[in-house]
Image: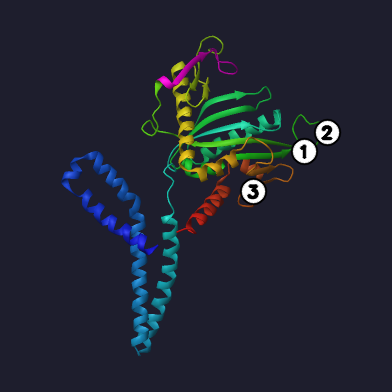
Amino acid sequence: MLNKLKVLEDKYKELSQKVADPDIISDQPTWQKLMKETSEIEPIVMKYREYSKASQSIAESKQILEEESDEDLRELAKMELSESEALLEEYENELKILLVPKDPNDEKNVIIEIRGGAGGDEAALFAGDLFRMYSRYAERRGWKTSLMSSNETGVGGYKEVSFMIKGKGAYSRLKYESGVHRVQRIPTTESGGRIHTSTATVAVLPEVEDVEIDINPEDVRVDVFRASGNGGQCVNTTDSAVRLTHIPTGEVVSCQDEKSQLKNKEKAMKVLKARLYDKALAEQQKDIAAERKSQVGTGDRSERIRTYNFPQGRVSDHRINLTLYKLDSFIDGDLDEMIDALITVDQTEKMSSI
């Protein structure tokens, strides 16, 4: 770890000289790129310098204890040694966290796709509950939510719903939500009071910038049709709904929530790019892809990452064996305790390889 930190410090010194070079400053794209790189490693280098200072203090205190016979000096050295050793341990832990490889998508907005799985109407209702849960979570964090496409059921749920959450670090916190979510409760349609089990799948995709993935317009078939369902006076009167088919992959995206055909096409293209980007990431990182697929699954009850048990008022995440007995507030968007625990476990696993 220390060798890696020394290399980063040398790189930081080199970058600091470059960003102060007038020739580079005049080349704004290059200067901005170097400034971004500098700002990314600066916190690590500053913490490493604190670590080095504490390490030097420990060495000096030990030297005093070895060479000095004056009791007052020895007592001061012992105090300094104790304080510096505590700081060194603290700085080492902080450095391990800082050295955890950053996910390049962490600061991005997200597109969340929720689909009802096993359980019929109850699964669709649960998909609607999850949609509201993530919308409330976004509100709590000051993020903005916009609906992209939806397929509602007659009972007030969703067969599927796609929406975007815009906010700094949205992907870094919501990426752990990908997988099968299971609910255990008595449906409103159940006259006998029996507990039913249903599922919904959640996929969290980072929003993709145009520069990150290029789609050949000739590879996309665009179909327009009349919207159906709730949508105001334009529903069933104009061909405002849009369906995009990416011919090479067979990926299909539909959007009908806007009155404007152009806006529906823009939203559908965002979803298409996010899905294709997600597939590209999966090809590059096969291990991560395999894990993600096992989480998202097909909606079968056995492929679950989390259970929402209403009779017991608990929510359990099976990946980290954490159970919280605050289901009402959780389903109302109070997700931070669970997400913080998931982040901690993820960071701990990554730190063990440093």
Nearer-the-camera pick, 97 or 3: 3
Residue at disc 1, secondary structure:
loop
264 vs 304: above or below: above
Mark identifier at residue 192: 2
| C-alpha gap between disc 3 and disc 1 | 20 Å
Q: Identify the residue under disc 1.
A: 195
**Crowding near the residue tagged with mark 1, few <14, some 14–19, many ≥20 C-alpha atoms within 10 Å:** some
The outermost residue toward the right is 192
Circle 2: element type: loop
Q: Nearer the viewer, residue 101 or 183?
A: 101
The spot of residue 108 in percent (x, y) is 43, 39
* Closer mark to the observer between disc 3 and disc 1: 3
Q: Secondary structure at mark 3?
A: loop
Amino acid residing under circle 3: His
Give the magenta-colored segment's residue range.
Answer: 218-233
Residue drawn 55% across the image and 13% down it: 235
**Residue 206 in the figure: left or right of residue 188:** left
Q: Quadrant of residue 114?
A: top right
Hey, what amino acid is under mark 2?
Gly
